[in-house]
Amino acid sequence: MSKPTDLVQGTVDLLILKTVALEPVHGWAIAQRIKLVSNDVLILNQNALYPALHRLEEQGWLRSEWGDSENNRRAKYYSLTRAGRKRLEQELAQWRRLSSAIEMVVSTA
Amino acid sequence: MRLLYRMGRRLRSLVRLRAVDAELNEELRFHIERQTAENIAAGMTPDAALRSALLELGGIEQIKEECRDMRRMQWVESSLQDARFAIRTFSKRQGFTLTVLAILALGIGSATAIFSIVNGVLLTALPYRAPAKLVRIYGAWEHGSREGVSPPDFVDYRQRNTTFESLAGASISTPLLNLKAVGDPEQVRSRNITAGFFSTLGIQPLLGREFTLQDEIWKAPPVAILSYGLWQRQYGGRASVVGEHLAINGVSYAVVGVLPPFFNFLGSTDLFTPIQYNPVPGIRSARILIVIGRLKSDLPSAQSELDVLSRRLQTEYSQFDRGWSAVAAPLTDEVVKDVRVGLKMLLAAIALVILLVSASIASMMLSHAASRQSEISMRMALGASRARLIRQLITEGLLLALFGGVGGCVVGYFGVELIKQFGPVDIPRLSDARIDTIALAFTFMLSVLVGLGVSLEPALRAGRADIAYELKAGSRTVTGRFRLRDVLVLSEITVSVVLLVGAGLLIRSLILLENVNPGFQANNVLTTRLALPGSKYSDGIGAKVTAFWHDAIRNIEAIPGVQSAAVTSELPLSGLNNPSPRTATADGGEPHHVYLRSVSPGYWNVMRIPLLAGRYLSTDDHKTSRRVVVINEELRKDIFGDRDPIGQRLTFDFQERNETENYQAVVVGIAGDVHHTSLAAAPFREAYLPMDQSPLFSYDLVVRTTINPKSIASDLRHAIWSLDRDESVGTLRTLDDVVGLDLAQPKFRGYLLAAFAAMALVLSASSLYGLLSFLVAQRRREIGVRMALGAMPADIFPLIVGKGLRLALGGLLAGLVLAFALARFMHTLVYGIGSGDPVTFVAGSLVLLIVAVLASYVPARRAVNLNPVDVLRTE
C-alpha cells in the first residue's frame, strides 16, 4: 500500500478528534472515514492510530465504551468528552492559523 | 471530574492490568476482522485478505506495548521496578541485608515497645470524662509531708467551694474484705468512697446508681457497688443483682450498683462501699481520703480558693488543722508521678538507640554504596537520569527500613508482652499498654525517617557522581565519603558513652539498693494479710479480736517447721502505710510526726529487728497493764536527743474510744530503724504499740520458718480455718518477694538501660571495626608499598589503631560531656551516688576504650600481616 502523504506532525490528534466529534465510532471506522473523507489522500498509519486513541483517552479527551457494531460484533466505540470538545476547538483554531499562515507564505512567494 | 476520571482509569489499568490487556486484544482483533472483511470485499482471497490486514496494522505486540505505555502510571511502575531491583540487589548481598534488617528490627522494635509503654502509661488520657479537668487535692502539712484529707475537712470543702463542679473522696487504704455472695466466698479489695465519686470522674454505673449523701450518714443502711469483674464472678453478669444482698465480713450489704468494665482508679478495686465516718471531733485529724475534684475553670483559681478555705479551717479547728493546707494537682500527673521520670528516661534512651541504629546503618550503607559506585557510574553512563538513580537509592533505604519496621513490630509486640510479664507490676496502667494503631503509626513514621536518613548521603553522592572520574580504571578515592563515615562512627561512640554512663549509674544504684539493710531479715518469712469481720468480732473492748490473733499465732507456731509468728498492722515495704501519721510529744517537748504500728510481742523476733536499748514488748503488756511503747531510733534521736528515753512518757494526738484524754504511753525500748516505704527512702519515725493495748481488725501475719516458707502455706490456712471456718486467707507471699517488689522498678530501668547500652556498644564497635577494615582494604596497596620499602609492622600498626583510638577518644569526650549534662535529669532515679558519680564515668570510659581497642586491633593485625609481594602482584 502506498503512503501518499505523510501526515503533518501533530495533526493526528486533530483528525481523530474531528472524526469522533460527529458520533461514537470505533477504531477501524475512524481510519476508514479519514481515508474516505480525504479522498484517499490522508491515510492514517494504523501503527499510530491505536496508541493515539489510548493516549487521547488517557488524557481525558475521549471516552470509550463497548457496543455492537454494524455486523453485530462487539466493538470499542470512542466518543468525545466535554474536555475533548474544547480541545478540538483549540486544535482547529490552531490548525486554521497555521494553514492560513503557510498558505500566505506559499502564495506570496 | 476529569481528574477523577483519569485517576479512575489509571487505577483500573494498574490494578486490572489483565482485564485492560484483554480489552486491547479484542479491540485490535475487531480491527483485523473488519479490515479482512473489507479486503475480501475488494476481491482478495480470505488468506491474502487476513495477511494484508495484519501487515497494514503493523506489529501487533508493538502496538499493544505502545498503547499500554500511554496508560500506565509511570511513576508507580518505575517505583515497583526500583523496588524489584532493590530486592534483587539485597538478595545478592544476603549477609549485608540480614544484618541491617536484624539491627533495624531490634532498634525499631525496642523503640516501638518502649513507645507503647510510655504511650499507654503517660500519654494516653485517663479513661475518664475530660480528664484534664480532674485534680487531686492533698492535705499538705507545713513541714512538708503530703497526706490525704480528713472526712470532715472534705465535707467542709465540698460545701464551701465554688470553683469545682464537684468534689469527691475515696479512702487511701484498700482493705481486703471477706465477701460471701452467690459464688464462692472470696477476699475482695475494697475502697470507701463518697457520694458523687463516679460522676466526678465521669463514669456511669452500668446498673443501678452510685452513692448519695444519704449513704454517707453514719450508721446508714450498708450498701455496696460491685466492679464489673466481681459481678461477673459472683453473679455471672445477672442484671437483677441490684437490690440483692451480699455479706461483707459477715454484715449484710445491699447491692445498689454495678460498674462498667475497665474501671480502674489508682489500682484495681472489686467493691466500693460508702464512707461513713463516726462524727467525733478527733476524726478531723484522720487524713484518710484521696480527694478528687472536677474543675469549673482553671487550676490556679481553684487553688487560691482552697487556700482561703483551708485557712478558715485552720482557725476554726486549730486543734486538728493547724499547719494543714490543701493543695490541688492535675490527676493525670498524680497517677503516674512515681514512674514519670523513669519512663521519660527510657524514652530518651530509646531515642539515642534509634540515632545510633541509624548512624550504624548509614555507615553500612556507605560502604555498600562504595562497593556499588562503579555500577552506579555505569548506569549513568548508559543514560540513567540522576533523579532516577537517587530515587533508586532512596527506594533501597526505605525498603530496608520498612522491612526492618515490620520486623520491629514483631519485636515490639513481644517486647511489650515481655515487659508486661516481667516488668514491675506497680507501674500504674501498665496493663493498658499495647501495640495499638498509634504505636504502629509511630513505628511506620520511624521506619520512613530512618530509611530516608540512611539513604540520604549515598543518594546525594550518586547525584553528584562524576562519571568519567569514577569509571577510570583503578581510581582509588579515599577522601570525602570517609570523612562522613568518621563522623558517623564518632557519633555512635558518643551515644554509646551516654547510654553506658546512664546504665552504669542505674546499675550502681541498684547494687547499692540491693545492699541496703532494710532493718529486718527477709529470708524464710511467709506473710499474708488477714481481716476479721467487725460484725463477728466487735465487742467494744477488743477482747474478741485480741483473743483471735493470739490463738492464730499460737496455732501457727505449732506447725512443724515454723519458728515463730507475729502480726503487725503494716508490713514494711508492702506498700501499706498508716494513712495518717500522728504526733508524739515528750513531756515539755515539741510534737513530732510519727507512724504508729500495732504489733504482737513476737514481732521483732520474727522480723529480727535489733533491740538497741530497753526491752521489746512482751505478753505482759496487756490490756489492763501500764500503756507502753517501743520507739525506733529515728524517733528517739528527734524527740529525746541525748536524754535517756527509757521510762519517759509520750503523748499522742488521739484518744481511745470512750476516753477524753490523749493516749499516753511509757517508752520501754528502742528498736532499730526499718525501711518502711521503700529501700531508697530513709527510715521515718515509728512507734510500736502492743497489740493488746491497741487491737485492730486486720493485720499482716508474719511467720518465720526453718524450712522453705512456701511449704507451710496449706498448714497455715488450716491453722486459721481451725479458728474460723469463714475466714478467707489471701495470697501468701514470702518477705523476700515483698522486698523484691520494692526493687522491681529500679531493676526494670537498670536492666533495660543496660541492654540498650550493650546494644549500643556492639553496634558502635562493629561500625568502628567496619570502618577500619574498609580503610585497610582501601589502603592495601599503599601499605604494601610501604612494607616493601622497609616499613616495619610497628610503623603500620599505629596507623590503623591510631585512627580507631582517635575516633574513640573524640566520641568518648563528647559522650562524657553529654552524659554529664543528661545525667542530672535522672538524679531522682539514682540512689546512694551523685548523678555525676566519678566511678561510673571512669568505668564507662574504660569499658568503651577497651572495646574500641579490640575493634581496632583486628583490622590493624590484618594490615600488618599483609604480604607486600602478594599485594603488589595483584595490583
Image (cartoon, rainbow, N blue to C red):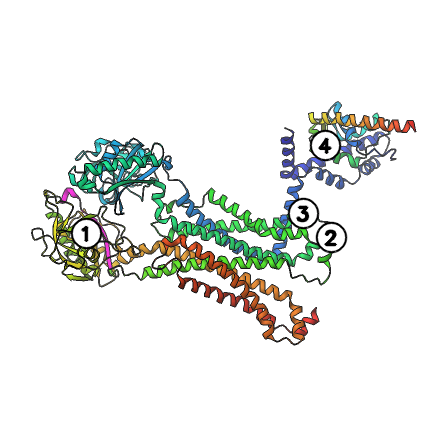
Distance of label 4 from label 1 (alpha carbons): 91 Å
Q: Secondary structure at mark 4?
A: helix
Distance of label 4 from label 2 (alpha carbons): 34 Å
Q: Nearer the viewer, mark 1 or mark 3?
A: 1
Contact? badges 4 and 1 (CB < 8 Å): no
The residue labelled by disc 3 is B388
Distance of label 4 from label 3 (alpha carbons): 27 Å
Q: Are marks 4 and 1 on the same chain?
A: no
Residue visible at 48% across and 58% down?
Answer: B815
> In terms of sequence position, does the residue under pointer 1 or pointer 3 come before the other?
3
Contact? badges 1 and 2 (CB < 8 Å): no
Q: From the viewer's perspective, is residue B270 above or below residue B668?
A: above
**Disc 3 is attached to a residue of which chain?**
B
The residue labelled by disc 1 is B597
Contact? badges 1 and 3 (CB < 8 Å): no
Q: Which residue is the extreme one toward the top?
A: A22
The residue labelled by disc 4 is A56
Q: Is residue B663 magenta?
A: no
The residue labelled by disc 2 is B381
Res. B678 mark: none
**Disc 2 is attached to a residue of which chain?**
B
**x, y percentage for residue B480?**
64, 58
Distance of label 1 from label 2 (alpha carbons): 87 Å
Q: Which residue is the extreme one toward the front?
A: B588
> In this view of the protein, can residue B411 be seen by the observer?
no
- How would you rate the neighbour count of disc 2 (Cα within 10 Å): few for under 14, some for 14-19, many for 20 or more? some
Amino acid type of disc 4? Leu
Contact? badges 4 and 2 (CB < 8 Å): no
> In terms of sequence position, does the residue under pointer 1 or pointer 2 come before the other?
2
- How would you rate the neighbour count of disc 1 (Cα within 10 Å): few for under 14, some for 14-19, many for 20 or more? many
